[in-house]
Amino acid sequence: MQRNMLVLLWLSTVCCFSFPVHAQVSVDGPFLDEPTVTLEELLKAAAQNPAVKSAHYAAAASRAVIPAASALPSPTLTFEQMGKLIPPSLMEGDPSSARTYGVEQEFPFPGKRGLKGNIASTEAESQKFNEQLAHLQVGSEIKQAFYELYFIRKSLDILLKNRDLLQNFIQIAESRYQVGKTIQQDVLKAQIELSKILDKLLVQGQKKRIAEAKINNLLHRPPETPVGKPAEYTRVELKYSLEELMALAQSSSPALKAQDSEIAKRKYGVELAKKEYFPDFALGFTYYERDQNPEMYRLMVSAKVPIYFWTKQRPELEAARLNLSSAQFMRDSTSSTVRFQVKEAYTTATTAERLAKLYSSAIVPQANLALSSAIANYQVGKIDFLQLIDASMALLEYELKYYESITEYHKAIAQLEPLVAVDLSS
């Protein structure tokens, strides 16, 4: 009777363990009473992320100042009273007594306004790419957190089922020990393995709370907001080779495009610094109102001559060139980092994919067969209870490793998306 119960317990465990790597993943177990949440729902809610909003408004602000950057300086209006102040009146017979009304307009040296407009435009372009990068990075983090939470919930399902299985093993071992058919060590071994599972349940429970808090943080919600049960998702296919991903990153990476815009801005800055060696001009007109004297008019043209160029213009030009060199080296550094990150994520994804296939096609089925053989041999007395427990625990570990590999695969693909600016899940 006890042996028949053992077989039934093993069959129920095998049924919840085995499915192919290419199948659609689904959540089962003790969380069916919770509402499900899809990855798409979380991604839509990402619009509330403060980093995304901040990048959006920064880009909008940069676009708003483009017209102002190339506009003329504000004109200067003047009024003068030359005569009596209290009460204000002109001095009769004094030719120098007059009221003057004037206007003056500065005109930067030709080309300066256009360069300032170009600097503002490239800054806006850089902020646009930063906005795109922020959106992609938050989306990537949400995907990774979703996959991690799914793995944790699946691990909890598997651990709880194995906890129940081990509890039944303990009952069987205790019954056999009471009638002298097994030794106390068998009971203790089963209890130790049960304690290990309980320990893993506590750890996974902690990880679950952290993963849910991370999702809530990304969605700008209170940490204790219920997230729900991760819904099933279809396995993503990585359709690009490493060389194709590298090419996409170099041509489409928002981080690199932002750096390119920064370099363009610094080049315009160098050109503007060169223009500072040339004078700015001003044009003015003044009307003189005089008592008992003919009206007078004044036309004025002035120029700001940069005669102290060695203390102002020359250092500014040197600083602009150094800033350009800094931006160029920063672009090289960013490019190198992006190439490394693409290679790292691609290697992680392909390795995890191979591991998942290995666990699904070979290791987990072999562990199932090993457990089946252990049960059969235990029933006829060829192996002891400890070997049966070891076979059961091995199957548990391999099943968890399978889900871990699937999770690492999808997280690595999510990490690639901000680097190549492509939705790899579609």
Image (tube, rainbow, N blue to C red):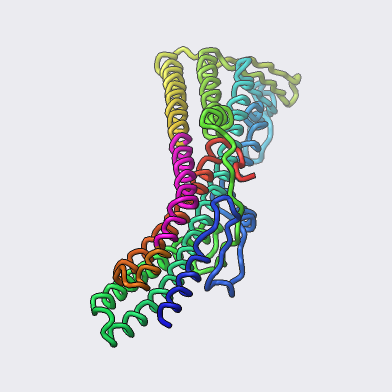
The quarter of the picture where the N terminus appears is bottom left
Q: Compared with residue 365, is residue 86 higher up or lower down, i.e. above or below? A: above
Q: Residue furthest bottom?
A: 178
Q: Residue at 44% across / 59% down in the picture?
A: 399
Q: Compared with residue 309, is residue 36 higher up or lower down, i.e. above or below? A: below
Which of the 4 quarters of the picture holds residue 264? top right
Q: Residue at 28% across / 87% down in the picture?
A: 178
- Residue 398 on image: x %, y %: 41, 57
Which of the 4 quarters of the picture holds residue 394? bottom left
- Residue 67 on image: x %, y %: 67, 31
Could one spot residue 81 in this view of the protein? no
Overall secondary structure of the magenta stretch?
Answer: helix
Q: Residue furthest front?
A: 380
- Magenta-span inclusion, residue 416: no
Residues 237 and 366: in front is 366
Residues 402 and 301: in front is 402
Q: Is residue 185 left or right of residue 141?
A: left
Q: Residue at 45% across / 36% down in the picture?
A: 341
In the image, which residues are magenta?
342-370
The quarter of the picture where the C terminus appears is top right
Q: Residue at 27% across / 75% down in the picture?
A: 186
- Magenta-span inclusion, residue 349: yes
